[in-house]
Amino acid sequence: MLPAEAPWIPTIPPLASSGLIHVIVDTPRGSRSKYKFDKVSGLFKLSRILPAGLQFPCDFGFIPGTIGEDGDALDVALMSEESSIVGCLMTVRLLGVLRARQVDSGRSIRNDRFLAVPATTVNTPRPRDLRDVARAQLDALEDFFVIYNQLQGRKFVPERRDGAHAARQALRRGMH
C-alpha cells in the first residue's frame, strides 16, 4: 500500500485479469545502475551503480501488492532476450522460484527470486516451467545474485529451484 503522500500513483494488483502476473521493472537487463521504487514520491530512485564489468543479466522488478520476508515486494527476474525500461508494467508467466536466504549483519531472511517470462496478447512465451530454461542460464543468474549481494556486504545463499506450481503457491503467500 502506498502512503497518502502519493495519491496519484495507481494501485496495481498482483494478478492481471488474464491470469498472468503483473510485474513492474525497476532495473533493465544490461544496466549497471540499480533502481528502486520510492513509495513516497512515486518515482524510481537510483540505489547504486555496479562496478565496471558487472551488469544485470535480466530485467529485474517486483510484483506490486505483495510483500516478502525482507519487507519489500516480491522480486522477479525476467527471463527474456530483450531489455525493457525502468517503470515498465508487464504481464508475465511465472516459471518458477529460486529459493534463497540472505544473510546481513548475522540476520538470515528468506529472499526468493521469482523467475518469469514476459507475455502479451501477441507474444506467447515458449517456456512454461523452470525446466524449460537452460541450467547454465539459471546457474549464471544465481552467480550474479551471489556476487551482487557480496558487493553490499551480504551473503546470498541459493537453496533450491522450484517450478511454476510452487512459484504460484509462494506468490499467494506473498499476497496476504
Image: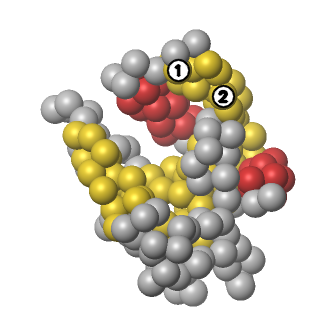
**What residue is at 22 percent from the left and 40 percent from the top?**
49
Q: Amino acid at mark 2?
A: Ile
Residue 173 in the image, given as x and y percentages of width and height: 81, 52
Dot 1 falls on a residue whose secondary structure is strand
Residue 74: tell me if it is visible: yes
Instruction: Locate residue 65: give its quadrant.
Output: bottom right
Residue 166 in the image, given as x and y percentages of width and height: 81, 48
User: Which colour style is shown?
Assistant: secondary structure
Residue, disc 1: 104
Q: Earlier in the sequence, mark 1 or mark 2?
A: 1
Return the residue found at the far top.
Answer: 106
Front in this rendered view, residue 149 or 52: 149
**What residue is at 66 percent from the left and 75 percent from the top?**
13
Return the residue found at the far front.
Answer: 5
Q: Amino acid at mark 1?
A: Asp
As displayed, is residue 64 above or below residue 96?
below
Location of the N terminus by quadrant is: bottom right
Residue, disc 2: 109
**What residue is at 45 percent from the left and 84 percent from the top?**
8
